[in-house]
Image: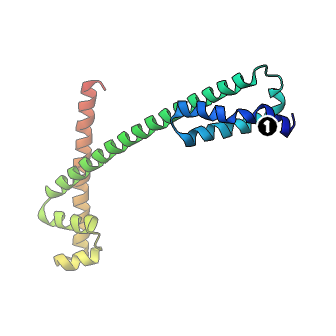
Amino acid sequence: MTQDNFQKMVYILKDEMYRFAKKFLMSADEAEDVVMDLMMKFWQKKEELLAVENLKSFAMRSVKNECLNRLKHHEVKLGFASQTRHQSELYQIETNNMREQILGFINQLPEKQKMVIHLKDVEEYEISEISEMMEMEENAVRVNLMRARQKVKESINKLYAYENRQIQGLGI
């Protein structure tokens, strides 16, 4: 099929294809995209189009199928976005809950350990700076920090163990 034959047989249907696609998609831009994509596909398979008995019917059926595919793909994308947003919200809630739990565990520590872990892990001061602020030896700061972290870790492990027992008790 020559370019001239293609224009006379196929390209002449583009306006009708566009109107049909626009009714399906309710979007002029999407309808244009559908028509242009189909025109490219038709051009690539121009020799096979010679065997089609009713070219207009074939073109309109192609438009309908392409529109349905795009609508279905759009629904899938919306579903994925909704699921991702939901998972993100759940992650944010979990993170906030864990942060609150850890801060609660820190607040239960003895005063020196609470100050040391706060200054080191929350405020991000160096050991030497904490030593000066609290008027303690650097080794004493390290020991208090190690003990504080160990107690927080034990509290977190107890919390996880408790939650796992609760989940297993529910049969989840």
Residue 34 on image: x %, y %: 62, 37
- At 17% from the left and 63% from the top, the residue drawn is 114
Q: How crowded is mark 1: few (under 14 residues within 10 Å), some or many (20 or more)?
A: some
Most foreground residue, 151 or 76: 76
SS for dot 1: helix
Q: Which quadrant of the figure has residue 161?
A: top left
Q: Is residue 161 above or below residue 112?
A: above
Quadrant where the C terminus is found in the figure: top left
- At 74% from the left and 34% from the top, the residue drawn is 12
Q: Name the residue under label 1.
A: 7
Most foreground residue, 26 or 116: 26
Residue 113 seen in the figure: yes
Residue 169 on image: x %, y %: 24, 26
Residue 58 on image: x %, y %: 71, 24
Q: Is residue 66 above or below residue 29?
A: above
Q: Is residue 44 above or below residue 170?
A: below
24 sits to left or right of 37? left
20 sits to left or right of 115? right
Q: Which quadrant of the figure has residue 83?
A: top left
- At 23% from the left and 64% from the top, the residue drawn is 117
Residue 144 seen in the figure: no
Number of numbered discs on residues: 1
Residue 106 on image: x %, y %: 18, 57
- At 61% from the left and 26% from the top, the residue drawn is 64
Quadrant where the N terminus is found in the figure: top right
Q: Which residue lies furthest to the top in this view?
A: 53
Residue type at mark 1: give it: Gln
126 sits to left or right of 104? right
